[in-house]
């Protein structure tokens, strides 16, 4: 919540879009004109892995924490991805932390993943920027508004 509250993610882009896989964003480096450093930035800290495959899987709409391949599987402090493969991405289970689920708006993620992109680095040719805000909902509001029960 601190990154959203401080507007840290605002203006960053979805810098990686991979058909039938994921859309990825949250890198502050994606705010600048240098596209070669996208995917390498974030706060100086990492978040310890919180992998629990009995509760959280890489199903369609799962929101996971990106990471740099470190052996401890610690997550980036800001970069995340959304699974856009309708069959899910079971190959990611046990390797990356899932921390959320899109319960409304996957149509937007589907539009993002279809944008024209550079075939070499999967970066969209046109910036797709973020404006991130926190909405607090009760369990009852989630059920009433989104037909979602946590």
Image (tube, rainbow, N blue to C red):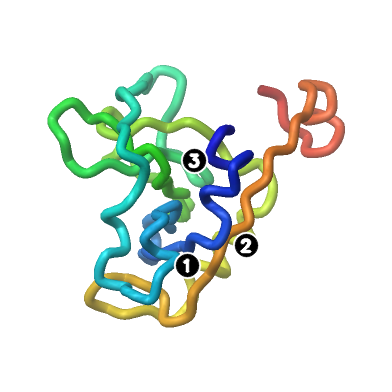
Residue at image point 39% right, 54% down = 27
Secondary structure under the numbered disc 2 in the rendered image = helix
- Label 3 and label 2: CA atoms lie apart by 14 Å
Which x, y percent locates residue 33?
A: 38, 76
* Mark sitting on residue 108: 2
Q: Nearer the viewer, residue 5 or 80?
A: 5
Residue 54 or 118: which is nearer the viewer?
Answer: 118
Residue 21, image x, y percentages: 37, 56
Q: Quarter holding the N terminus? A: top right
Q: Residue at x 46, y 62 (%)?
A: 14
In terms of secondary structure, where does tag 3 sit? strand
Q: Earlier in the sequence, mark 3 or mark 2?
A: 3
The one of 43 and 76 positioned closer to us in this rendering: 43
Residue 9 shows which numbered tag? Answer: none
* Label 1 packing within 10 angstroms: few (<14), some (14-19), many (20+): many
Pointer 3: residues within 10 angstroms few (<14), some, or many (20+)? many
For marks 3 and 1, give the CA distance. Answer: 15 Å
* Residue pictured at 78% horizontal, 29% vertical: 137
- Helix, strand or loop at disc 1? helix
In depth, the one of 42 and 93 nearer the eye is 42
Q: Can you name the residue that lies furthest to the left here? A: 71
Q: With respect to residue 36, does 73 lie above or below? A: above
Q: Image quadrant for the C terminus? A: top right
* Residue 64 sits in quarter: top left
Residue at the spot 41% in from the left edge and 75% down from the top edge:
124
Identify the residue position indicated by label 3 in the image: 62
Per the image, the residue denoted by label 1 is: 113
């Amino acid at each position: 919540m601190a990154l959203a509250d401080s507007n840290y993610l605002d203006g960053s882009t979805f810098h990686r879009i991979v058909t039938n896989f994921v859309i990825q964003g949250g890198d502050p480096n994606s705010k600048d004109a240098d596209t070669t450093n996208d995917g390498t930035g974030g706060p100086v800290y990492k978040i310890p892995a919180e992998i629990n495959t009995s509760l959280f899987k890489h199903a369609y709409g799962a929101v996971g924490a990106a990471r740099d391949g470190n052996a401890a599987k610690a997550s980036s402090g800001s970069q995340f991805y959304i699974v856009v493969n309708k069959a899910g991405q079971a190959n990611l289970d046990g390797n990356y932390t899932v921390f959320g689920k899109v319960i409304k708006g996957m149509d937007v993620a589907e539009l993002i993943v279809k944008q024209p992109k550079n075939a070499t680095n999967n970066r969209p040719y046109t910036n797709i920027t973020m404006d991130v805000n926190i909405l607090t909902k009760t369990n009852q509001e989630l059920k009433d508004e989104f037909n979602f029960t946590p």
